[in-house]
Image (spheres, rainbow, N blue to C red):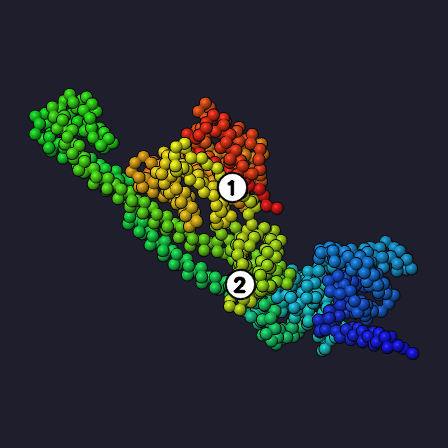
């Protein structure tokens, strides 16, 4: 008897056995399609009844879908229904060997293998199994050189087609995850379809081959949907397969490729256009190849294929087009074109407005010189009308020697203008000797200058202010015009890159509804993706950036990621090119002994397009006034860089502002270093600044300049020096308080370079502090005699 426990165990085992049987015979529609594909591809043979496609497709099924006996049975059934002879059984042996090899060589190690490794193991396993099967059967038939050649050919073709079929493994085996196909996947899928069609039983109705009709329909339809590239490639591929299996002559390969290309060329004319293109292509190649009316592809087969295409429901066509993002691209192009046109028109309108305002306010240098000349002439006229007109020497001075008298008066006027008033010792000897009314001229000129000088100064400041406003408006016009140009030129949408990204993400199971790839003015790519939500914390953004980086062979990083819409079902991920270099900046500064405020100011910060700025400004003099000048220069630099102004306009603007801020002799140096963190290039812009230093390993390079500080002359000049930097380099910027600290040294630049070279530390903050400490120590100073600032950045390449 069976006990209760045994009965329960028996019952459970019975249920389990029932579940297994149920699972075994409950085959899904997807598995049914794969079984049919395996069966029909198994029927395709080429020269001498070689059947490499069957083994290649079965190996991909085993590798990427499921190693199940039922797929081996389907392949074996296809082989035997095509050729039931002794040679066919070597492929049955190959299937058995392949099933065993996958169990030993792939399945047991699948958990630690990636997709690439699985593919190569499958290909090598299949190659060996095919070759061994041939050798085993050739032992009984007799090994000949020809048989060995066939065995090697069969094995190599199998190997190659495994690599080809691998391209569509996730399209065939995971269709629910895929929405966008690449051109390679479409063509490979076309090869699979062509092989399946070629494996059909050769059914003929009224001398019309069903196999040929389906082949022509496949090329015609995919050429119509996916264009010239797919149509021609698929036509040639289908032609090769049909030719190798003996269905069509070899010269028909070119005919199918040409017809597929014309079907794609005329696809913009609709289905009728693609059908007409196919017929025209067949007619042209027929006449060119044999010069007769005997067409290469039967006309009736093409007509029937065309009728099937016409009858194909619109929803099917739209569904297939969605797999290439056809509608997305068309809608995007139209939308972007309208946006670009609208923005370009509006921005160019603003640019013209600002340019017109700039011309309205424009005051050139000649206008300012004329104003000064007019002021000088007015002072001289008033002075001579008061004193000289009633003098007995008037004729001698102004009629006999007008040039000398006028030059003396101008020189005197310059002295008055510079010093505010004249002293008796300052009057020219020639004028004192000839003029009996020196004292009266002196008083009249000083009084006139005092009364008109203020008006002149006001007019001068007003003219210079107008010039500054004009420059700013012109600069704004240039920025807006450049932005409009950027929108028109750089706001280009590379459909190839967008499709590559969407296909790569789709292959990884990430649904992307839209991808926009733009290129900024520096040639850097910026990518915006709209993805279906995959989790609740946007962690997929970093996975997406990794996939995009691998696809484009460039490093990208996540600029931002956020949900879009109230239902939070999609997220927008923005990617930018990752910076090749990382940077850390340290700063050390000391205030001049006895001062409360440091006259030096500095900044360091990243800004757009992978750029980083370091800047130091030294206000001339000391104290609050010097600090105000340098702070103004640094603040304007930061703000204008963020807005996007050109560096030339930035320097010109800062110079004008400093000149207008203070009529006295206050000015500032500007030392700027613009770092391109992607390309690894540093641009030094120096305006009256001290040398900078680049420490690379144990060598120190000095970067010098000879330009004047800003705020002194109206037309400021500056030096721009570019240097490549490497991982581990230090960039060191200083103010003159550091360079001039050691009074005993003549070659101060070389002295400081040697001092920097001897400091061994990887820390930029410690480097800055040790430079200050060592400078004071070697200069034998307890306290700094001038404000001292050291700005140090260290760069290293990202891994």
**Nearer mark to the viewer, of 1 and 2:** 1
- Residue situated in front as seen by the camera: 380 or 601: 601
The image shows residue 437 at horizontal and vertical percentages of 12, 26
Which numbered disc covers residue 320?
A: none
Which numbered disc covers residue 563?
A: 2
Badge 1, how many Cα within 10 Å: few under 14, some, many 20+? some
Q: Earlier in the sequence, mark 1 or mark 2?
A: 2
The image shows residue 150 at horizontal and vertical percentages of 82, 57
Is 316 situated left or right of 384 in this image? right
Q: Quadrant of the N terminus?
A: bottom right
The image shows residue 541 at horizontal and vertical percentages of 58, 58
- Residue at image location 44% in from the left, 24% down from the top: 743
- Residue situated in front as seen by the camera: 221 or 202: 221
Q: Which secondary structure lies at badge 2?
A: strand
Would residue 722 be visible to someone looking at this image? no
Badge 2, how many Cα within 10 Å: few under 14, some, many 20+? some
Q: Are marks 1 and 2 in contact (CB under 8 Å)?
A: no
- Residue at image location 17% in from the left, 27% down from the top: 405
- Residue at image location 45% in from the left, 42% down from the top: 603
- Residue at image location 60% in from the left, 76% down from the top: 313
Counting the numbered discs, the total is 2
Q: Which secondary structure lies at badge 1?
A: strand
Which numbered disc covers residue 585?
A: 1
- Residue situated in front as seen by the camera: 207 or 376: 376
Would residue 768 be visible to someone looking at this image? yes
C-alpha span from label 1 to label 2: 34 Å
Is 330 situated left or right of 666 in this image? right
């Amino acid at each position: 008897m069976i006990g209760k426990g045994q009965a329960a165990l028996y019952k459970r085992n019975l249920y389990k056995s029932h579940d297994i049987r149920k699972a075994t015979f409950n085959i899904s529609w997807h598995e049914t399609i794969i079984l049919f594909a395996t069966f029909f591809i198994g029927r395709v043979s080429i020269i001498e009844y070689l059947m490499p496609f069957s083994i290649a497709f079965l190996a991909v099924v085993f590798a990427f879908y499921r190693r199940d006996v039922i797929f081996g049975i389907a392949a074996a059934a296809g082989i035997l229904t095509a050729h039931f002879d002794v040679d066919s059984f070597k492929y049955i042996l190959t299937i058995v060997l392949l099933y065993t090899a996958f169990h030993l060589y792939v399945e047991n190690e699948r958990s630690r293998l990636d997709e690439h490794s699985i593919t190569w193991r499958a290909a090598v396993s299949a190659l060996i199994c095919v070759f061994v099967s041939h050798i085993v059967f050739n032992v009984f038939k007799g090994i000949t050189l020809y048989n060995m050649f066939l065995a090697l050919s069969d094995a190599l073709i199998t190997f190659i087609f495994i690599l080809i079929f691998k391209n569509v493994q996730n399209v065939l085996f995971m269709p629910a995850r895929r929405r966008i196909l690449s051109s390679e996947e479409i063509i490979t899928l076309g090869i699979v379809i062509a092989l399946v069609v070629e494996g059909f039983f050769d059914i003929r109705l009224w001398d019309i081959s069903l196999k040929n009709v389906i082949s022509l329909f496949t090329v015609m339809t995919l050429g119509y949907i996916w264009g010239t590239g797919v149509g021609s490639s698929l036509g040639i591929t289908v032609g090769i397969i049909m030719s190798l299996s003996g269905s069509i002559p070899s010269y028909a390969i070119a005919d199918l490729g040409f017809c597929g290309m014309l079907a794609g060329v005329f696809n913009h004319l609709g289905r009728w256009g693609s059908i007409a293109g196919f017929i025209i292509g067949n007619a042209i190649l027929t006449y060119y190849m044999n010069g007769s009316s005997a067409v290469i592809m039967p006309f009736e087969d093409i007509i029937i294929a065309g009728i099937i295409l016409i009858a194909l429901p619109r929803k099917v066509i739209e569904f297939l087009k969605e797999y290439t993002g056809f509608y997305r691209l068309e809608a995007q192009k139209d939308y972007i074109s309208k946006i670009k046109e609208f923005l370009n028109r509006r921005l160019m309108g603003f640019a013209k407005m600002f340019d017109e305002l700039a011309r309205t306010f424009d005051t050139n240098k000649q206008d300012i010189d004329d104003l000064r000349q007019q002021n000088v002439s007015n002072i001289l006229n008033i002075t001579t009308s008061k004193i000289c007109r009633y003098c007995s020497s008037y004729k001698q001075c102004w009629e006999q020697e007008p040039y000398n008298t006028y030059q003396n008066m101008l020189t005197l006027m310059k002295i008055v203008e510079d010093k505010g008033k004249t002293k008796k010792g300052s009057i020219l000897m020639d004028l004192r000797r000839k003029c009996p009314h020196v004292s009266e001229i002196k008083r009249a000129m000083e009084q006139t200058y005092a009364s008109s000088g203020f008006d002149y100064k006001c007019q001068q400041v007003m003219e210079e202010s107008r010039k500054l406003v004009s420059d700013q408006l012109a600069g704004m016009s240039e920025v807006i015009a450049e932005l409009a140009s950027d929108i028109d030129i750089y706001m280009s949408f590379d459909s190839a890159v967008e499709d590559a990204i969407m296909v790569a993400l789709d292959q990884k199971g990430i649904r992307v509804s839209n991808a926009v790839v733009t290129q900024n003015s520096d040639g850097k790519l910026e990518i915006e993706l709209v993805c279906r939500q995959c989790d609740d914390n946007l962690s997929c953004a970093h996975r997406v950036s990794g996939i995009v980086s691998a696809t484009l062979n460039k490093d990208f990083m996540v600029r931002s990621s956020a949900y879009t819409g109230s239902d939070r079902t999609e997220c927008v991920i923005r990617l930018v090119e990752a910076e090749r270099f990382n940077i850390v900046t340290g700063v050390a500064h000391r205030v001049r002994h006895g001062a409360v405020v440091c006259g030096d100011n500095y900044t360091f910060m990243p800004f757009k397009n992978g750029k980083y700025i370091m800047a130091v400004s030294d206000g001339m003099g000391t104290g609050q006034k010097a600090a105000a000048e340098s702070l103004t220069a640094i603040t304007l630099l930061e703000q204008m860089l963020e807005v996007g102004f050109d560096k030339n306009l930035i320097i010109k603007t800062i110079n004008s502002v400093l000149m207008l801020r203070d009529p006295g002799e206050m000015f500032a140096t500007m030392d700027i270093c613009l770092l391109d963190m992607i390309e690894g290039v540093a641009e030094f812009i120096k305006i009256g600044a001290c040398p900078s230093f680049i420490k690379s390993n144990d060598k120190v390079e000095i970067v010098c300049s000879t330009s004047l500080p800003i705020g002194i002359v109206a037309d400021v000049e500056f030096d721009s020096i570019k240097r490549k930097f490497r991982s581990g380099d230090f960039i060191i910027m200083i103010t003159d308080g550091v360079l001039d600290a050691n009074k005993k040294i003549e070659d101060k630049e070389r002295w400081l370079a040697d001092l920097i070279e001897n400091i061994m530390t990887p820390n930029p903050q410690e480097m800055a502090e040790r430079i200050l400490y060592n400078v004071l120590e070697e200069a034998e100073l307890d306290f700094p005699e001038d404000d001292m600032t050291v700005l140090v950045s260290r760069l290293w390449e990202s891994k």
